[in-house]
Image: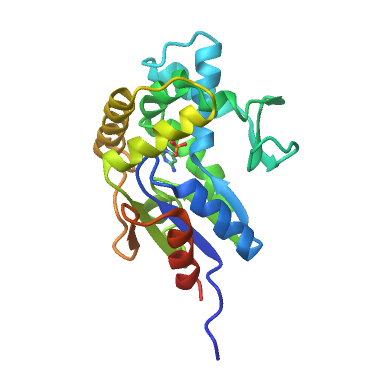
Amino acid sequence: MAKPQPNIIAIDGPAASGKSTLGRRLADSLGYLFFDTGVMYRAVTLLALQRGIDIRDEAAVTALAEVTTIDVLPASKFDGRAYDVIVEGKDVTWEIRSHEVDANVSIVSAYRNVRRAMSEQQRRIGQRGRVVMVGRDIGTVVLPEADLKIYLDASAEERAHRRHDEIEARGEAANYDDVLTKVIERDRIDSTRDVAPLKVAPDAVIIDSDRMDADEVFERARKLCE
Ligand code: DC
């Protein structure tokens, strides 16, 4: 008998490695829910900034994370979004991608109890199955029971190129060296934090996408599902 398709798929990896692009395509092709967990940390960061909360004030940011309702819903608009991100009833899908959020989200996502609050919600959604969940700690902490774990990697330079092109495609100005510095800094924070640092799960399949385009990465991942 053929092996069934994996029910829970975890994709982890560093910033701008192409996890979201892969996760979205894989979920579409399988008819699964695509859940990009980074949006939850971004939403808390955005709300803290909007409310004038000091991002370094762990207690204040944690208190906010614990009472904030974050919803990820099917896309309501055809403006390139994969889903709607709703925080306290407001659509913040694009606002959570701002430079200011980018610059502060690694600090927020390193807070122990912010992670606990977010991970609990992620776990509840993931355990329903038929899901492709994308993040940094999905295969290691949030859903260690995932049926397929992919660690999507690429060099910092390659990821900075991709992020740089993405920013320019949105019509914004970007400097490659600045983008590279930020990518390296986020890697450092994400992989050296005490709680749930970015690392490869022992049973993960590593895909190094440096010399692969998005289609090749997708084909490789699709084969792993068969
Ligand atoms: O994938 P992203 O760039 O949207 O993630 C935003 C931030 O959230 C990034 O600093 C890493 C963090 N993150 C995390 O710590 N754990 C996750 N499961 C997802 C994201």
Residue most extreme to the right: 76
Image quarter for residue 92?
Answer: top right
Residue 2 against residue 118 in the figure, above or below: below
Q: Measuring 50% from the left and 21% from the top, which residue is drawn there? A: 172
The one of 169 and 179 positioned closer to us in this rendering:
169
**Percent position (x, y) of residue 181?**
27, 26
* Left or right, 116 with reference to 125: left
**Percent position (x, y) of residue 207?**
34, 60
- Quarter, ligand 1: top left
Q: Measuring 52% from the left and 27% from the top, which residue is drawn there? A: 97
The one of 114 and 207 positioned closer to us in this rendering:
207
The one of 98 and 176 positioned closer to us in this rendering:
176
Residue most extreme to the bottom: 1
Kindly tell me whether residue 132 is visible in this rendering. Answer: yes
**Percent position (x, y) of residue 157?**
27, 39
Kindly tell me whether residue 127 is visible in this rendering. Answer: no
Colour option used: rainbow
Residue most extreme to the top: 52
* Left or right, 184 with reference to 83: left
Image quarter for residue 158?
Answer: top left
The count of marks equals 0
Q: Measuring 55% from the left and 74% from the top, which residue is drawn there? A: 5
The one of 39 and 97 positioned closer to us in this rendering:
97
Q: Measuring 37% from the left and 29% from the top, which residue is drawn there? A: 106
